[in-house]
Image (cartoon, rainbow, N blue to C red):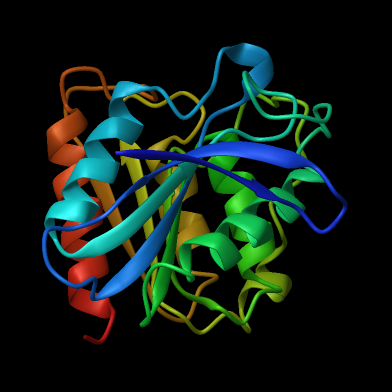
């Protein structure tokens, strides 16, 4: 694991950790964490599990802290200026690996990652874990179906069976707005995927390996 810093287009210095696969990378991944005002950071078991799974499958993986979180500079932007953080993370991880990039977001990070991916041509696939669709968290609205329909890249929507923020009916409804999406529901767990981190990570890793070209 290699600690590093990188800078956003508006001059904010962010802290992150880079994990490289044992062999030459087949592509790269950026991991976006949960809401920093509710304890979210890159250092959460579900994100560790996803990071390790993707690295095991051959991806160079960058996990980072959003602005205003732990050692990252700047101030919390309510999910709006954080899209600049994701853009900078994509640029930084692409220095480590050629090939396609998957953006993986959990909760708040899924909301931010989705909105950046809609505008960023460097993104090749998107994995959204526990995307908040209920119980507002003071974050921007999820884009409308008409805004999502032009996004023709592969999308994974993953949630726990008992996720109060991403209930299965709402997740499946949202999936129909994407031209190329799949839904995965992890049984016996909730938004935090406690004790099911490896199961969820394997789903994300399998999705990335399957949909992205070598």
Q: Nearer the viewer, residue 179 or 101?
A: 101
- Is residue 126 depicted above or below 199 in this figure? below
Residue 213 left/right relative to 145: left
| Quadrant where the image shows the C terminus | bottom left
Residue 119 placed where, x, y %?
71, 74
- Is residue 41 depicted above or below 38 in this figure? below
Residue 32 left/right relative to 149: left
Q: Residue at x 66, y 23 (%)?
A: 69
Instruction: Determine which quarter of the picture holds residue 188.
Output: top left
Residue 201 placed where, x, y %?
21, 43
Q: Residue at x 17, y 48 (%)?
A: 53
Residue 33 left/right relative to 192: right
Report the number of discs.
Answer: 0
Q: Nearer the viewer, residue 211 or 55?
A: 55
Instruction: Determine which quarter of the picture holds residue 2.
Output: top left
Is residue 132 something that shows in the picture?
no
| Quadrant where the image shows the N terminus | top left
Is residue 87 something that shows in the picture?
yes
Instruction: Determine which quarter of the picture holds residue 58.
Output: bottom left
Residue 131 placed where, x, y %?
51, 42
Q: Residue at x 56, y 12 (%)?
A: 39
Q: Nearer the viewer, residue 135 or 82?
A: 82
Residue 167 left/right relative to 174: left
Q: Residue at x 51, y 73 (%)?
A: 178
Give the residue at the far right of this rendering. 10
Residue 151 placed where, x, y %?
58, 79
């Amino acid at each position: 694991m290699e600690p590093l810093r990188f800078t956003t287009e508006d001059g904010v210095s962010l802290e992150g950790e880079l994990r490289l696969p044992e062999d030459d990378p087949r592509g790269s991944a950026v991991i976006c964490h949960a809401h920093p005002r509710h304890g979210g950071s890159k250092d959460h078991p579900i994100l560790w599990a996803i990071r390790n799974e993707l690295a095991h499958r051959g991806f160079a993986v960058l996990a980072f802290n959003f602005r205003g979180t732990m050692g990252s500079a700047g101030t919390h932007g309510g999910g709006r200026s954080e899209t600049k953080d994701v853009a900078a993370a994509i640029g930084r991880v692409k220095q480590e690996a050629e090939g396609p990039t998957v953006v993986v977001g959990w909760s708040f990070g899924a909301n931010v990652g989705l909105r950046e991916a809609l505008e960023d041509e460097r993104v090749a696939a998107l994995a959204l874990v526990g995307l908040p669709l209920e119980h507002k968290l003071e974050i921007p609205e999820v884009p409308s179906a008409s805004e999502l329909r032009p996004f023709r890249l592969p999308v994974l929507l993953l949630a726990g069976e008992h996720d109060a923020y991403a209930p299965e009916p709402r997740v499946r409804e949202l999936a129909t707005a994407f031209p190329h999406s799949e839904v995965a529901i992890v049984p016996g767990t909730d938004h935090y995927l406690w004790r099911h981190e490896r199961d969820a990570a394997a789903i994300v890793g399998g999705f990335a390996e399957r949909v992205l070209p070598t």
